Amino acid sequence: MVVSKSWTMVKHFDGEPKPEDFKLIEKELPPLQDGEILLESVFLSVDPYMRPYSGRLMKEGDVMIGSQVGRVIESKNSAFPVGVYCVANMGWTTHFISNGKELNPLPSEWPESLPRSLALGTVGMPGLTAYFGFLEICNPKEGDVVLVNCAAGAVGSIVGQIAKLKGCKVVGSAGSDDKIQFLKDIGFDEAFNYKKVGSLEEALKKASPEGYDCYFENVGGKFSDAAVPQMKDFGRISVCGVISMYNDAVPPSGPYIQPLILFKQLRMEGFLVTRWKDRFVEGQKQLLQWVLEGKVKYREHITKGFENMPKGFMGMLKGENTGKAIIQV
C-alpha cells in the first residue's frame, strides 16, 4: 500500500493564512484498477489564486487546491507508462491515483536541460497567464509604455519580458532591492521599490512622465488608485489579480475610477486564464521556445520539503519569493 500525505484546510482563512489553518493527514491508497495510474508529486505549486479560491471552492477539511508535476510510478494505463511526468491539479498531496483524463503530460520536446518545475511556472499556468492576459487584453504595440506591478513574481516577470520582445518600454514595481535588481537583469527599463518611495504617484511619474499605454494589474488597492490616473488616453488595463486585497474581510473604499475610464476612454478588463484553454498548447510552445532561445529568463523560489507547503504558501502571499514559488518534495 502507498501512503499519501495531504495538507487540508482546517478552517476558512480569516485575514492572512496562519499555520494552524492547515493540517497534515495521511491516507492509504487502494490498489490500481484497470486504466488507472499512480503518481508521486515531485514539484508542487503555491499561487496567489489559492487564497481567494479556497473560500469559493473548498469546504473546511478539504485538501488544499493546487497543481503539481507528478511522476508515474505505477500504471495500468498504456497511455501513461512508468516514468512519464505530468501536470495535474490534485491539490497539496504527495501521491494520487488518476484515470488519466485530468493529466497533462509534459511536452514531448521538453529538454533535459530545463527543470520540470517550469511546467508550473514560466511554461505553465503563470506563463500562460502572462502570455494571454497581456497580449490579448493589452494588445501592445511597439513603443507603448507598459506598467507591471508585482513585477518580480511568477506572472509579472514574464509579462515584462514579453513586453520587451514586442518593442515596449517597461516599468516595474516590486517590494525589495534584490527584486529590483532582478527586474533590471531581465530587461525592465525602469524599476522601483514601492516600499521605499515617498510617493507612489511621484515614483510612477518619474518612471514615465508621459504616462502609460498598458497596465498589467496584479496588486489592486492603493497601487491602482495611483496608477489609473496616469494612464494615457485609450490605455488598456489587464486585471490579473488584486493580491493586496485578498485578506480583506471588508473591501476598503477607494477613489472612484469611472470618470477616469470615461474621459480617458480606457479599457479595463479582468480575466481568468482558462478563457484561452483551447490555445494553451500554442502559448506553451511559444514560451518554451523563448526560454530555450534565452529571450525569456526565469527564476524559481524553491522551498524543499512537503512538510513546508503551508510555510511556502504564506511566504508567497507576503512576497518572499522572486519568480515562481515552488515546493520540491
Image: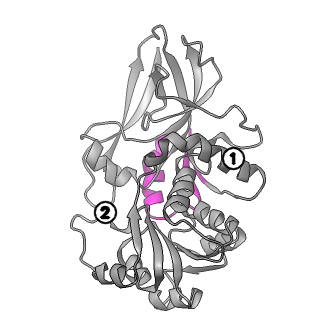
- The tag on residue 288 is 1
The colour scheme used here is one colour
Residue drawn at point x = 58 percent, y = 63 percent: 159
Q: Magenta segment, which residues?
A: 301-329
Q: Quarter of the image holding residue 280?
A: top right
State whether residue 304 appears in this view.
no
Neighbourhood count class around disc 1 (C-alpha, 10 Å): few under 14, some 14–19, many 20 upward: many
Asked whether 268 or 310 is in front, the reply is: 268
Nearer-N-terminus badge (1/2): 2
**Amino acid at pointer 1:** Leu
Q: Secondary structure at mark 2?
A: loop
Query: Residue 172 occupies which quadrant of the picture?
Result: bottom right
- Callout 1: SS: helix
User: In this rendering, would 290 be left or right of 250?
Assistant: right
| Point 33% across, 60% down: residue | 16
Q: Is residue 194 left or right of residue 50?
A: right
Q: Write the residue at 52% across / 81% down.
A: 212
Q: Where is residue 97 drawn, in percent x and y?
A: 46, 21
Q: What is the x, y in percent for residue 180? A: 62, 75
Within the magenta stretch, is there residue 302?
yes
What residue would you read off at disc 2? 247
- Residue 209: x and y in percent read 56, 91
- Residue type (three-letter) at the residue carrying disc 2: Asn
Magenta span includes 25:
no
Location of residue 219 (image quadrant): bottom left
Q: Taking the image as drawn, is residue 169 in sight?
A: yes
Per the rendering, the mark at residue 230 is none
Q: Against 120, is 255 above or below? A: below
Real-space CA distance between mark 1 and mark 2, rounded to the nearest whole angstrom:
34 Å
